[in-house]
Structure formats: C-alpha cells, structure tokens
Image (cartoon, rainbow, N blue to C red):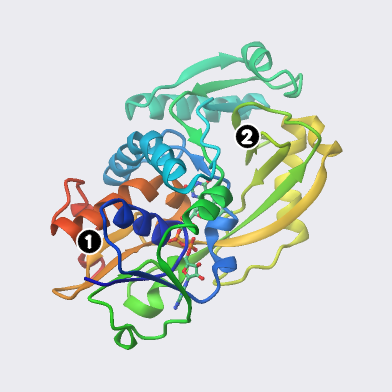
Amino acid sequence: MSIGIVGGGIIGLSIAFELVERGVEAITVYDRDPSQGAGLVAAGMLAPTAEANFGEDALQELMSESMRRWPSFAERVEARTGVSIAYRTEGTLLVALTADDQAEVDRLIGFYRRAGSPIEPLSGRDLREREPLLAPRVRGGAFAPGDHQVDPRRLLRALRTLPVRFEARDVNTLSTLRDDVIIVATGAAAAALTGLPVRPVKGQLLRLRGPEPLLRHVVRGIAGGRDVYLVPRADGELVVGATEEERGADTTVTAGGVLDLLRPAADLLPGVAELVLAEALAGLRPGTPDNAPIIDRLGNSEVIVAAGHHRNGVLLAPATAAAVAETVVDKATSIDISAFGAGRFT
Ligand SMILES: Cc1cc2nc3c(=O)[nH]c(=O)nc-3n(C[C@H](O)[C@H](O)[C@H](O)COP(=O)(O)OP(=O)(O)OC[C@H]3O[C@@H](n4cnc5c(N)ncnc54)[C@H](O)[C@@H]3O)c2cc1C
C-alpha cells in the first residue's frame, strides 16, 4: 500500500511518523515549499489549559488527549530520529500587570477550574519567586502545570529525517497523484484541494535572543489589556507572540504588529529591551468556522483530510497523527474524532 501525504508541515510529518512507527514503508511527502509552513513560525506552546475556550468541549477533549500523548510522542520521535526536540514540562505562568488585568486572570482561573484543568492562583510575590526577572509591579496570576512547550523547529528538523520519500511538488489536484491512500495536510491552504472552509489566520511573532534565558516557564501575560506570550528556550531565545489577524494569506510584518507584541512583553519582563531582535515573522494558522480541525475521510474515497488545526496544531499533532495512522492501517481509530468530520460544514 502506498501513501501520499500532501503537505510536509507539523501535521503531515507527524502522520508520516506514526505510519513509519506502524511499519508502513511506501510513504511520499509532497510539499511545494516547506519554508512556508506555520510550524516554522509557531511558538510551540502545548496549552490544553490556557487555550480552552467556552463552548469548545470536543476540541478541549482532543487537546487533553493529545497532551496525554505528548510525553511518549516526544520520546519516540527522539528515539527514532536522534534529534532533540526540547519538550519541556516546567509549566506555564499566567501573569497580570494591572488590577483590570488581574480581574481578567481571575475570570480565566474560574473558567479553567470549571473545565477541570489544574490551575493554582499565585500572588505577585509568588510569581517573582518563580521568575525573579518579572516586573516588580506584576500584580498576580496563576500556575498552569499541565501546559508544556516544545521547539517546533526542532520537531520539524527531527521529522524531516524520517525514512520517507520527499518530493518538492505543488499539488494542484489530487487526481494527479497515484498513491493508494492520499492524506491532505496542507494547513491554511487546505481549502484549495478539498473545498472545505479552512482559512488563513495571520499571526505575527518575534524571536529575541540573549546570552541566557530570562525565564524558565512559559509566561502568558496581560498588560494593560494586551495579551502576549513569552516562550523561553534553553539557548537564550525568547519567542514573543502573537497577533491574530484576518488578512487572508498576507504574511507581511508590520510596525504595529511588532509594537503590539513588544509593548506588553517589555512591561511584564523589562529585560526584553536588552535582547537582540533576531526575527520578526508572520505565519498562517489554518482556521475553521468552529476553531476545531477536520480529521476525516472525504466521502467513501481513499482521501483523508487532516487540516484546520488553527492555534493548536503543535499540541494536536500526536492525537491527529495517531488517529489518521490508525485509520489507514487498522481501518478504525480508538481516538474519538466524531466531532471533527468534514460533513459538519455542509
Ligand atoms: C504565530 C503563530 C504561533 C503559533 N503558535 C502555536 C503554538 O504555540 N502551539 C500550537 O500548538 N500551535 C501554534 N500555532 C499553530 C500551528 O503552527 C499550526 O496549527 C500548525 O502549524 C498546522 O500544521 P499543518 O501541518 O496543518 O500546516 P503547516 O504547518 O502550515 O504546513 C502545511 C504544509 O503544506 C504545504 N502545502 C500547502 N499547500 C500545498 C500544495 N498544494 N501542495 C504541496 N504542499 C502544500 C506547505 O508548504 C506547508 O509546508 C501557531 C501558528 C502561528 C502562525
């Protein structure tokens, strides 16, 4: 059985990985330009707690399922490829700067508790004990121990060493492919090949660099009503993200976007101003009308779609990849993907 995977981003390559793990040999990954994937821009937060939203219960369950799979997924990827992907489990701090920001964090804490997620309120002093370089006027926040992080660029580097055939190709129609099973994992471009309502949602993000890390935890902050997240890497890189803009497939970086990120970042963590601005970039999240992915066979065909992972494609990669690989190899999956059918939009 030959498998063609269209799209060699986080989702396509994670599916390739789970197929290789199951002994499938004839896999071709078609990608027109891997440097355009959202995974190279993504921060790598694995945040089933902080990414939970009201009314998205099925998505929440899939995020939790995928998070449960992350430790073993990371271990297996590293064991097979020999590449470290920097999966880190220190957890995430929610941080509020002003009294109004604190009121918003208190509201979020209540919501996360009702959703059953582990969350521990912290005072400003508690926060500075855990992260001494936070601004002295930080008011309070919370600790989300279940929200972890990984380096998506390392993950992609690891997955590109898999024993599969990589073909540089812009696939315009699926009928040109000769593989027995075709998996469409073209992210924000999935509408063109499937007709499904996946749209690009622009996100601008910065990569700053210093001699050593300013933080140990991922910080999700609110400063004067502005949201920002700060994701530290061991080598001194600090990822600052991200805007969310409905601008079609535009990937320009704007002065306003950079300002919207740097202002709250420096308010929460003044040391940010000393770092080198190494990269300012924009990527396209694959958004859907209900913010949840599409993981489904197209009708009775041998075409399976795995796209529309929006803000959480890195988090959702292990569960998505296992569900698709089981569907291909075993003709059924133990993961509940019934809420993620293509038919819900027709
Ligand atoms: C600023 C930003 C921050 C983010 N932060 C996080 C985060 O912290 N945590 C998280 O979980 N997620 C995050 N995401 C979301 C995450 O990046 C996406 O959900 C994820 O990358 C989707 O993976 P994908 O493989 O579906 O798409 P992509 O990673 O975009 O890959 C799609 C691939 O398909 C190829 N392709 C497209 N069309 C064709 C075609 N016709 N023929 C051949 N190849 C084609 C492209 O070249 C590309 O390589 C973030 C996204 C952005 C933009």
Q: Position of residue 113 (x, y in %)?
A: 37, 24
Q: Residue at x 81, y 31 (%)?
A: 271
Return the mark for residue 176: none
Q: Name the residue that disc number 1 marks.
A: 341
In the picture shown, does residue 128 fall above or below 148?
above
Residue 53 seen in the figure: no
Residue furthest toward the bottom? 176
Q: Residue at x 43, y 40 (%)?
A: 74
Mark 2 falls on what kind of element? strand
The amino acid type of the residue labelled 2 equals: Ile
Q: Position of residue 323 (x, y in %)?
A: 25, 52
Give the quarter of the figure containing the C terminus. bottom left
In the picture shown, does residue 145 fall above or below 77?
above
Give the CA distance from mark 2 to mark 1: 35 Å
| Residue count near mark 2 (Cα–Cα under 10 Å), binned few <14, some 14–19, many ≥20 | many
Is residue 58 rendered to the left or right of residue 244? left
| Label 2 vs 1, first from the N-terminus | 2
Give the quarter of the figure containing the N terminus. bottom left
Q: Name the residue that disc number 2 marks.
A: 222
Residue furthest toward the right? 274
- State which mark lies toward you, 2 or 1: 1
The amino acid type of the residue labelled 1 equals: Gly
Instruction: Determine which quarter of the picture holds residue 163.
Output: bottom left
Residue nearer the viewer, 47 or 68? 68
Residue nearer the viewer, 191 or 335? 335
Q: Residue at x 53, y 21 (%)?
A: 142
Is residue 263 rendered to the left or right of residue 198? right
Instruction: Determine which quarter of the picture holds residue 267.
Output: top right
